[in-house]
Image (tube, helix red, strand yellow):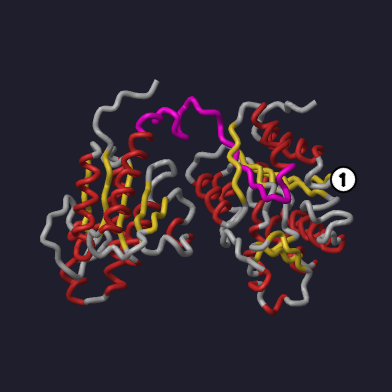
Amino acid sequence: MSPAIEHPPRCLLLATLDTKGAEAAYVREQLIAAGIEVTLIDCGCLGEWVGAADVSRESVMAAGGGQLAELAARGDRGAAIRTAAAGAAKLVREAYDRGEADGVLALGGSAGTTIGTSAMRALPIGVPKLMVSTLASGDCRPYVGDKDILMHNSVVDIAGVNRISRAVLGNAAAAMAGMLRGRAAHLDDEPDSPRDRPLIAATMFGVTTPCVQHARALLEAAGYEVLVFHATGNGGQAMETLIDDGLIAGVLDITTTELADELVGGVLSAGPDRLTAAARRGVPQVVSVGAVDMVNFGPRHSVPDRFADRTLYQHNDTVTLMRTTPAECAAIGREIAAKVGAACERAAILLPLNGVSAIDKEGQPFNDESARRELFAAIRSELESRGATELVELPWHINDPEFAEAAANKLLELLGKPSTMK
C-alpha cells in the first residue's frame, strides 16, 4: 500500500519575477487549482515586479553568497545569474531535505533556464523537475546534465500570457501536478527503499548489448537489480553520480567507450572523471573494454576534416563511428588500468581477447588485431606497475555468452556472493 499522504503535494516554482512575474502568477494559479501547494521563489535581480514572492530575491542572492543591492548596482547580468543559480540550488536542496518540496517547476529564457536547472540538478533522481524554457528545442545537455529534468519548449518567448503561452504554461502546470500526485502514490517504491534489492550499475552500447543483457539476467537471478546505462556520455555521467551518491552496490562497467570519445574528441564523452567513482567510494567493480574500438560523431559530414583518412563506419544516418588507432587504444588502456588500479582488490579488469565490440571481430569493419594488441598490452603493463588489481584474460569475444558469464561471476565474487552459474 502507498503511505498516507499527510499534506497536498508541494511544488517550488522558480522564476525571475522582474521579467516573468505574470507568467509565474498564472502557473501558480493553475497549480493551486489542481490542489498543489506552491512556494514561489523570485530569482530575479535587475528589475522589479509588483507581486509578492514566498521567497524573496534578497534571500536567493544571500544564499548564493551575494547581496542584492550590490549586484543590482553593478548591473552585471552574468554575476547576478551565477549568484542566483547558486542560491536557488542551495535553497531548493534545503527545502527538499526539510520535507518542504516534492518537485520543482521553473520558467525562463537563458537566464531563468540556467538558474532553474541549477536548482533542479541539486535534487535526487526521481524528484519531479520541469523546466519551461525558450531553449528546450536545442541542445539541452548543459542544462539537464545527469539528472531527470524534463525540458518543455515554450514555443513563444515567455513574455506575457497569450493564447500560445497560456496553453504551454497550463500544460506545464498540469504535467507537474500529475507527476507530483503520481510520485505520492509510489513513494514506497523509491530507489532508497530498504525493501529494494541491491543495485548493480552496468554500461551498455548497441555493440555490447548481448554481453550486458546476458550478464544482467545472471545478476538479477542472484538477487540484484541492474541499472543499465547507455554509454553516450550522459549515461556514464549519471552512473558516476549514482555511485558517488552511495546508491550502487556493485559496477559492471563492460562498456568504457566514453573514454575513447574523451581522448580523441568524439561527441559522447562523459568527461575526465569517468571511471573514478567506484574506486573513490570503494564499490566493487568489474571493468572491460567494450566499444573502445570506436569514437562517435554525428552524420558523416560532421566528422572533422583531420580524420578524413581514418576508418569510418556509418552506423545510421545520424551516427558515424571512427576506428581507434593502435596508439589511441594504448592510451585508453593505460587510462583504464590507472583508474581501476586505484581500487586495488575491489576491482578486476576482464579482457575479451577476440574482440571488444560487435564490429570488432573477423569479417567486421573494425576488426584490427594490432589495435587490440596495443590496448591489452598497455593494460597489462600499467597494472604490473601497480600490482594489486586482478587482470583476467579470456579467449572469447565480448558478446560471447561465456564472457558475460565470467564477468557476472567475477562481480558476484567481489561482492562476496556465490555464483549462480553452473
Q: Nearer the viewer, residue 111 or 109?
A: 109
Which residue position is annotated with label 1? 395
Q: Residue at x 20, y 70 (%)?
A: 46
Apparent side of residue 142 relative to residue 3 in the rendered image (left or right): right
Quarter of the picture containing the N terminus is: top left
- Going by the numbered disc 1, the residue's amino acid type is Pro
Residue 294's place in the image compared with 417, above or below, is below
Element assignment for label 1: loop
Residue drawn at x 56%, y 50% is 277
Q: Position of residue 33 (x, y in %)?
A: 21, 40
In the image, the segment drawn in magenta is: 184-210
Residue 260 vs residue 387, the one in the foreground: 260
- Note whether residue 396 is visible: yes
Q: Is residue 90 visible?
A: no
Residue 292, given in percent of the width and then of the height, sits at 72, 58
Residue closer to the observer: 191 or 111 = 111
